Amino acid sequence: MTLEEGRPEAPVQHITSPLRWVGFGFRDIVVFRELLYFLTLRDIKVRYNQTVLGIAWALLQPLFSMLIFSLIFLRWAGLHSPGRFDSLTILTALVPWQLFSYALTQSSNRLLDDAGLIRKVYFPRILIPISSVLAGLLDFAFALLLLLLFLIVSGITPSWRIILVPLMVAMTLASALGVGLWLSALNARFRDVKYTVPFLNQVWFFLTPIVYPDSLIPEAWKPIWNLNPMTGVVNGFRWAFLGNPFDMTPYFLTSVLVTVLLLLSGWLFFRGMERSFSDWL
């Protein structure tokens, strides 16, 4: 008998789910809801840990972005359009965009940051990107208060339309999570993905009518333009808070449909790949 033949095999540890696969795994989310809460709270604390201004950054980011874009596009470029388009119009679009941008970036990269936790214990991996998305709601709440303050100073009173704002927020979170799930799963396998996220974020920003009005988009291009779910969200925010014209159908329904497809496809793709995360990370 050789030395190799007499040596006992090294123990192999298998990290598996104690729950059965149920549909999309929604039951896992319910069972581990407390863990989701603590992961979300952790992401919020990490974001503002050892910062001087703390939560004030949630106000400064959209405020300074509004000032810079207003200076460039309204004053220097002299951008004009039929109807209202001013600094407040830009700020109204920046509020949901800030939530989308943060949620997309964090959900795409958080899996790598929690690699040590993933290798040690089982829990539904999808909780990590979901918690990253939910953590952005705190910044959004403060940015929304800033927007309401500007509306009051400008003498604008929001109408009943603001009851549809939660729908716009849900679309923002769903679209960011859908894309984030795709990128997060791919990022675990191919590290190149994390370098493409900032570029994707910038391109997506300029494909969304934030610093320019939707009226500048040619009518022939609007069916394609509204495949971007954030186009419907931005126009919906301006309609809800400023009373800007907004065609709910068919363009907005197109944005809703794309959002649902992004979320479902991203969810299924992530769930199908998560068994290999422990090997890749």
Image (spheres, grey):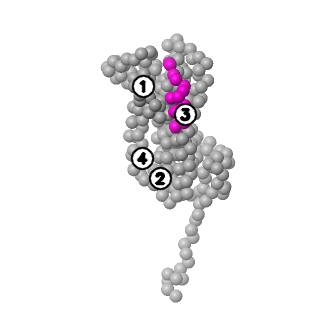
Give the class, few, some or many, for how many residues have Cα within 10 Å of label 1's Cα (few <14, many ≥20): few
Q: Determine which residue is flagged by label 4.
A: 194
Between disc 4 and disc 1, the foreground one is 1
Residue visible at 49% across and 81% down? 4
Question: Sequence order check: which comes first, mark 4 or mark 1?
Answer: 4
Q: Determine which residue is flagged by label 1.
A: 219
Residue 204 as seen in the image, left or right of residue 6: left
The percent coordinates of residue 137 (x first, y second) are 56, 33
Say which element carries label 3: helix
Tell me which amino acid carries mark 2. Answer: Ala
Residue visible at 67% across and 45% down? 30
Give the class, few, some or many, for how many residues have Cα within 10 Å of label 2's Cα (few <14, many ≥20): many
Say which element carries label 2: helix
Say which element carries label 4: helix
Numbered mark located on residue 259 in the image? none
Question: Sequence order check: which comes first, mark 1 or mark 2?
Answer: 2
Seen from the viewer's position, the closer of residues 208 and 169 is 208
Direction bottom: furthest residue:
1
